[in-house]
Amino acid sequence: MKLTTLSYNRQDALSYARRWALKRNPFYYNYDNLGGDCTNFASQCLFSGCKVMNYTPTLGWYYINGNNKSPSWTGVPYFYNFLVNNKKEGPFGLECPIDDIMIGDFIQLGADKNFYHTLFVVDIDGAPNPNNIYIATHTLDSYNRPLSSYFYTNIRYIHIAGVRKWL
């Protein structure tokens, strides 16, 4: 077997977001009352577009059930750290400037160095800027909400570069 890099299916991820942004997929636990559901929803969208999990204990990215999941599946900083550091199976990405963000990528909002919210990009109308990037998210459920409607003091953009799978 060989670890092979495959494309991330942005359309599948977008279709998932469109279907589930304003409701809950019963397959996944709803973490609204345990700190928020935004990164859980982001992970669901990402999984829909990559179809590969990384079952490495603690440092991987996976969901089996509400009590058996990696910290990166639901935790804002862990999601980021997994994506930008993953060299093994599963999705991988990089922090990028706003100009490189695409539909199907992720944005995290923060205050100073504490990032607290993960958003999924569903549309960009022209050259990317906060006024024409539209997102989907859980916790404060939204679909096609302008990024400019959020208050934040720090922001980072995560571009999904691909997915690795053992073939």
Image: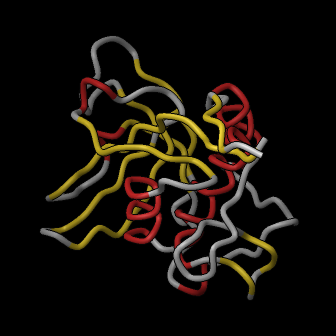
| Up/down of 29 relative to 95, above or below | below
Q: Nearer the viewer, residue 40 or 93?
A: 93
Q: Nearer the viewer, residue 127 or 63?
A: 63
Residue at image point 38% right, 53% down: 84
Quadrant location of the C terminus?
top right
Q: Position of residue 66 (x, y in %)?
A: 75, 82
Residue at image point 77% right, 46% down: 1
- Left/right placement of residue 32 relative to residue 12 reads left
Residue at image point 23% right, 51% down: 155
- Left/right placement of residue 58 relative to residue 161 reads right
- Left/right placement of residue 79 relative to residue 34 reads left
Q: Position of residue 102 (x, y in %)?
A: 43, 26
| Up/down of 111 relative to 4, above or below | below
| Up/down of 143 relative to 115, above or below | above
Q: Position of residue 18 (x, y in %)?
A: 70, 37
Residue at image point 28% right, 14% down: 127
* Number of numbered discs visible in the structure rendering: 0
Q: Residue furthest right?
A: 27
| Up/down of 103 relative to 63, above or below | above
Please identify the quarter of the rendering in which residue 104 is found: top right
Q: Position of residue 28 (x, y in %)?
A: 79, 68
Please identify the quarter of the rendering in which residue 151 is found: bottom left
Q: Residue furthest top?
A: 126
